[in-house]
Image: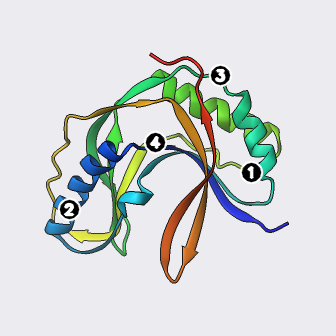
């Protein structure tokens, strides 16, 4: 069985993607260069799993998660510094439901012998990688969105184009 590069994520509606795309356009305009996120690829990673052929096991774990829907709000932008260009991101407000969801998924995947990085979770949405810019100003839009599902995603590299494919979607039962 072929291995796939997998991760769990929160995917966005077209409206949220448009708001984030406007932030990316602002960053692009101020940058000297960079590799900017495609609107179709925008997501909030919950757990990076990596190369595996255990897709069915991940789906079973996702199906055990019991989480109410919750709201997230875009909150502050920032960067992770790298010597070949920085990673610029948009953050979300701190939310105990998000942290519980991420922790629960990580714990269950580790218990099933998936090798998950054991580092603090820093929720962010990547706007651009390898970005070279002199202190760009990215306004944080007033935007909130409801999280009512999670996705099992596959990362695909085709002709140096990165794309993400949703393989499975787990809806939360209790909505607002």
Is the Cβ of the residue at disc 1 closer than 8 Å to that at disc 4?
no
What distance separates the C-alpha of mark 3 from that of mark 4? 22 Å
Residue 116 drawn at (x, y percent)? 69, 48
Q: Are marks 2 and 4 in contact (CB under 8 Å)?
A: no
Residue 122 is marked as 4
Q: Given the current orientation, which residue lies at the most extreme right position?
A: 1
Residue 112 left/right relative to 102:
right
> How far is mark 3 from mark 2, CA to CA?
37 Å
Choose the circle earlier in sequence order: 1 or 4: 1
Q: Secondary structure at mark 3?
A: loop
SS for callout 4: loop
Numbered mark located on residue 96 in the image: none
Crowdedness of circle 4 by 10 Å Cα count: few (<14), some, many (20+)?
A: few
- The disc, 1 or 3, on the residue closer to the chain's N-terminal end is 3
User: In this orientation, which residue lies closer to the viewer: 142 or 130?
Assistant: 142
Disc assigned to residue 66? 3
Mark-to-mark CA distance, 1 and 3: 23 Å
The answer to whether any part of residue 94 appears in the image is: no
Residue at numbered disc 2: 25
Front label number (2 vs 4)? 2
Between marks 2 and 4, how big is the CA–CA gap?
A: 24 Å
């Amino acid at each position: 069985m072929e291995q796939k590069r997998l991760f769990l994520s929160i995917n966005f509606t077209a409206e949220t993607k448009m708001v984030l795309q406007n932030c990316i356009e602002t960053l692009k305009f101020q940058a000297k260069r960079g590799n900017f996120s495609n609107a179709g690829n925008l997501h909030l990673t919950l757990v990076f799993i990596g190369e595996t052929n255990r897709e069915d096991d991940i789906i079973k774990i996702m199906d055990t998660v019991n989480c109410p829907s919750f709201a997230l709000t875009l909150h502050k932008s920032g960067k992770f510094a790298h010597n070949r260009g920085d990673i610029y991101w948009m953050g979300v407000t701190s939310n105990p439901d998000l942290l519980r969801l991420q922790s629960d998924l990580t714990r269950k995947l580790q218990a099933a012998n998936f090798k998950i990085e054991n580092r603090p979770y820093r929720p962010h949405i990547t706007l651009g990688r390898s970005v070279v810019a002199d202190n760009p100003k990215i306004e944080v839009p007033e935007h909130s969105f409801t999280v009512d599902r999670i996705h099992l995603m596959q990362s695909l590299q085709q002709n140096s184009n990165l794309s993400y494919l949703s393989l499975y979607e787990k809806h939360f039962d209790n909505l607002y």
